[in-house]
Structure formats: C-alpha cells, structure tokens
Image (cartoon, rainbow, N blue to C red):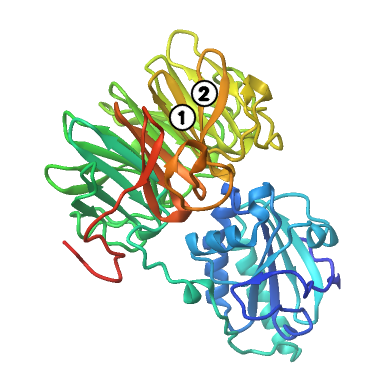
C-alpha cells in the first residue's frame, strides 16, 4: 500500500448502520486506525476477505476499527434487511454502513469490490488496496504504524464495544441458512447442507432425522459424524451404490467424502488453504489448493465441481484422485466457446442431463452449459451473459434476465432455476431457451401455496425426485417441497431438529 496522507471524507450519519447501536464518525473514532472494507455480499472475493478482517480486528482490537461499507451490485443487495441477513450468515462482527447509492464509494474513489481503505487516528486517508490476499501486507503495515503513532502519543488505546446483529437475532433456528439440498428418492433420504450451522443434516423425504454429520461449529476436522467439522458446506453429490456422499466444503476450500456406512468424514481434495492461482491447472487431490468449491455433480466416476472462487468448472477423477480444471480460463466474465477460452463468473450451481453440464453462473445472472461429448463447447442457455446484465424478465435465450441465480436442477426435461435475488423459481426449456417464472411473486416472504402465489427468501439450492422438487430456501432457514404436477409448495417440518448450541437431539 502506497501511503498518501490526505484528509478522509467523513462517514455519513443519516445512512443505515448495522452491527452498532448508532452511526460512527471518524471524529468519534479519533485516536484509532480505521479500515474501511468496500464490499457487496454476493461477491466471492469480498467473502474471502472477511477472515482477514476478523484476524486484523481481533489482533488490533484496542487500536483498530474495521467498518464494512456495503455498496451493492445487485438491486436485492440494497435492502437493509438482506444485508442484515448476510451479516448473520457470514458472522460479521464489525459495523457495516449501508452505501446503496454509492456515495461513500465515490467519495473514496473506489473502483472495485473489495477495496480496503486505511485511515489514520487523526482522520487522514493513508491509502487503499483492491482485491484479496492483502492480510500480511496490512498486518505488517499496521504493526509499524501503530508503533510510530504510539511513539508520537497519537493513539488512544481502548477496546471498542459494539451491539452485534447476532446478539439481537441469534441463529437458534433448527436450520441456519441452508445452502444446498440433495434428494435421494430410492433411498428415501434428503441431504441438507445446513451451512450456517456448519453441518450436514440427513432426513427422510418426509423430514424424519436420520443423521447429523458435523459437530455444529466451524472448523476443519476429519473424524466421526459427531466430531467432524465443516465450514459453511454447500453442494453435494451422492454415490448411492457405494453409500458415499461428496461435499463441497466451501469456506475450507476442500472436497469431503462421507462414508455413510462407516460414518466417517474424510478429505479427498484440497488442504484447507485457498488457492490464488486461477489459470487452468491440476494435480493430485490432496496436494492441490482449491478456491471455494460451491456445488457438485457426479457423472460416472467423475465429480464435476462449480469452483466459484476461480470462476471455473473443475473435474475430479474419483478412481485416481486427480483433479483439474475442465472449463474456464479463470477470468471473471461470460465468454462462450472452447473450454480453455471460455469464462465464467462465480459458478454456484451445477446439474446435468448426461450430455451437458448446466451451470448457474451467478455473477452474470445466466444459465450456461458445458458439453460432455467430443469437442465440448460452452454456451449460454439463457440470461445476458454480462456482469451487469441482470433483472427479472421471462423470455427466450439472451433476452431473459435473472438476478444472481445460485442453483439449477435438471428434472422432467426442464431446467429449474433458483433465481435467488428475485426470490423465484423459474423453469427453462433446454433446447429453446424459453424461461418462465413458475413459483414466487418476487416479493420476500415465506408463503406456501401454489405457483406464483408463493414466496421465498433468497432460495439457493434445488434437487428433484420424480414427483417433487426440494428447495433450500436459504434466508427463511427452511426446506420447501414442491409437488411437480400441481406446483403446490409446502414447508417441511423436522421434528426434533435443533440448532447445535440449543440441544442435541441425537
């Protein structure tokens, strides 16, 4: 970071603030360093910065205040309540200023998410860095600056107390921000990524508890069902013949293997550290770094991975343990064509009809496909394919507008889409690209019923049997069941299921 000392613009007091009882000002924070984090909660790069911020705010808690400045990309992210839910989901423990009009962004001449701005104890802007991976640089700089300012008597060392959203709204629901769901019709099982509770919940299709997998607190540990640890797990794939469940353990940057017979959790790819290398590459599973795997689908003995953090689709040969990039150059964009020249933008959902992979490409708000046959190509099924081409428009092909779609499921010769930020479920005819809303009226809510008379809140996961579609209704902390013939929606009840810190039912 290049140091340039100029007076920092004051923070607005009239905007909404979260994780604090009152607005904060640089004048009020005089005597402390301030680190502004310009972020938006859809952005995978912004999410990668959060552990770095937590490290710094805890290490320098008597001399540093971190403030998130939420400058929304998508319309849905401008809503204060949705930002509050993101704060709860990602366990953010610093104040957040809601900058929906980009005024603070413009005052600080920010150009990209995420951007970190450092302000000194006298209210002077020192410099900024963009992107991820700056923790060590900031740590070294802060340690030097704190000593220098301390020698000059310009630091007021004291701990800074806050009233956090999680204190006002504790996560005591049986499920917490479930990210993905996987239905196994033949085995009468439902696998739920209980992402906010860092565990996998296994039930019958009617909601009777079979297993709880994971200790219920974030961590990275291979062990038995009760002792294993995950960190915000997401997508799953089932090998029913061998009773193996594969997990995208997203914030641990690894793939896990759950032996449902032996009741053991193992790691098959990744080592718990995030990769910062985005060009196509590969290697042996346990020797390679991964970058936020978000969803999985199994085709034969190959596990395909929506690698959200590197904007790529990866493949893992389960027989050999080798894993490598399948499609995507690593650039964040919507580029069709040959596998190595194509580009994705935070792919977060994946499914297949056996001939093609279908991808919920969230940051370009589009459904993409990747061929599995000879000379495979990448194409856009529906959506604009552009980073800022989002909205809520039914139609055909490139005229369709989605808003940060996070899930796609192939069933009944259709693609079903969790149009996450529009709070809808849409259905696409694969060959024509015709996309139509079938569930949800676009308003945030939790309302059962039929068709577009229903309501959801940021649905993020889908899985179908021959008769039902199951939806991970993430911000409602619920699993919804849809009768495919009538499009009637009900909410599953899980008798005896509790939050990990409330009770232990099994």
Crowding at dot 1, Cα within 10 Å, few <14 / some 14-19 / many 20+, comes out as many
Judged left or right of residue 417, residue 16 is: right
**What residue do we see at 30% from left, 29% from top?**
467
When asked about the image quadrant of residue 156, the answer is bottom right
Instruction: Please state which of residues 6 and 441 is positioned toward the viewer in this rendering.
Output: 441
Can you give x and y, in whole percent of width and height, for residue 450 in the image? Answer: 44, 38
Q: Which residue is mark 2?
A: 428
Can you give x and y, in whole percent of width and height, for residue 192 in the image? Answer: 32, 47
Judged left or right of residue 246, residue 166 is: right
Can you give x and y, in whole percent of width and height, for residue 99 in the image? Answer: 74, 61
Establish if 88 lies above or below 468.
below
Q: Which residue is mark 1?
A: 416
Cβ–Cβ under 8 Å for marks 2 and 1 = yes
Q: Is residue 292 visible?
A: no
Judged left or right of residue 461, residue 57 is: right
Establish if 121 lies above or below 41.
below
Can you give x and y, in whole percent of width and height, for residue 237 in the image? Answer: 31, 35
**What residue do we see at 52% from left, 61% from top?**
51
The disc, 2 or 1, on the residue closer to the chain's N-terminal end is 1
When asked about the image quadrant of residue 346, the answer is top right
- Dot 1 falls on a residue whose secondary structure is strand
* Disc number for residue 442: none
Quadrant in which the C terminus is drawn: bottom left
**What residue do we see at 42% from left, 47% from top?**
448
Gap in angstroms between the C-alphas marked 2 and 1: 6 Å
**What residue do we see at 38% from left, 21% from top?**
412
- Dot 2 falls on a residue whose secondary structure is strand
């Amino acid at each position: 970071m290049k140091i340039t000392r100029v007076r920092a613009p004051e923070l607005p007091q009239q905007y909404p603030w979260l994780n604090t009882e009152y607005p904060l000002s640089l004048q009020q924070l005089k005597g402390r360093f301030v680190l502004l984090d310009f972020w938006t909660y859809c952005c995978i790069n912004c999410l990668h910065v959060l552990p770095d911020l937590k490290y710094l705010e805890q290490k320098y808690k008597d001399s540093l205040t971190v403030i998130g400045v939420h400058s929304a990309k998508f319309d849905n992210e401008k809503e204060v309540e949705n930002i509050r839910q993101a704060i709860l989901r990602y366990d953010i423990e610093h104040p957040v200023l809601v900058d929906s009009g980009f005024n603070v962004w413009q005052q600080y001449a920010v150009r990209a998410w995420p951007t970190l701005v450092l302000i000194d104890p006298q209210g002077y802007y020192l410099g900024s860095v963009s992107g991820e991976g700056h923790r060590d640089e900031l740590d070294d700089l802060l340690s030097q600056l704190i000593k220098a300012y301390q020698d000059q008597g310009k630091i007021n060392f004291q701990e800074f107390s806050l009233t956090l959203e999680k204190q006002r709204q504790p996560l005591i629901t049986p499920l917490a921000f479930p990210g993905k769901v996987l239905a196994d019709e033949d085995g009468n099982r439902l696998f739920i990524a209980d992402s906010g509770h860092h565990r996998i919940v296994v039930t019958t299709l009617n909601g009777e508890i079979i297993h709880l997998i994971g200790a219920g607190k974030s961590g990275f540990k291979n062990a038995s069902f009760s002792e294993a640890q995950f960190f915000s797990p997401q997508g799953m794939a089932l090998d029913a013949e061998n009773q193996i469940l594969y997990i995208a353990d997203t914030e641990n940057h690894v793939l896990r293997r759950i032996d449902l017979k032996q009741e053991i959790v193992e790691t098959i790819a990744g080592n718990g550290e995030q990769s910062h290398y985005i060009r196509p590459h590969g290697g042996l599973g346990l020797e390679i770094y991964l970058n936020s795997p978000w969803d999985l689908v199994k085709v034969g003995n190959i596990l395909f991975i929506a690698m959200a953090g590197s904007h790529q689709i990866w493949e893992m040969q389960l027989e050999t343990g080798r894993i490598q990039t399948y499609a995507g150059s690593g650039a964040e964009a919507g580029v069709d064509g040959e596998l190595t020249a194509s580009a994705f933008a935070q792919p977060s959902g994946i499914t297949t009809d056996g001939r093609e992979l279908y991808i919920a490409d969230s940051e370009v708000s589009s459904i993409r496909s990747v061929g599995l046959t000879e000379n495979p190509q990448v194409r856009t099924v529906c959506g604009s394919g552009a980073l800022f081409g989002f909205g809520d428009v039914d139609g055909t092909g490139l005229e369709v507008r989605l808003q940060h779609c996070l899930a796609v499921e192939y069933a009944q010769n259709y693609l079903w889409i969790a149009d996450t930020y529009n709070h809808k479920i849409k259905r696409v005819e694969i060959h024509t690209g015709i996309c139509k809303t079938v569930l949800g009226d676009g308003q945030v809510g939790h309302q059962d019923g039929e068709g577009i008379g229903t309501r959801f809140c940021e649905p993020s996961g889908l899985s179908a049997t021959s008769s039902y579609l199951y939806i991970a209704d993430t911000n409602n902390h619920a699993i919804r069941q849809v009768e495919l013939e009538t499009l009637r929606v009900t909410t599953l009840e899980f008798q005896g299921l509790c939050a990990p810190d409330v009770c232990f039912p099994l």
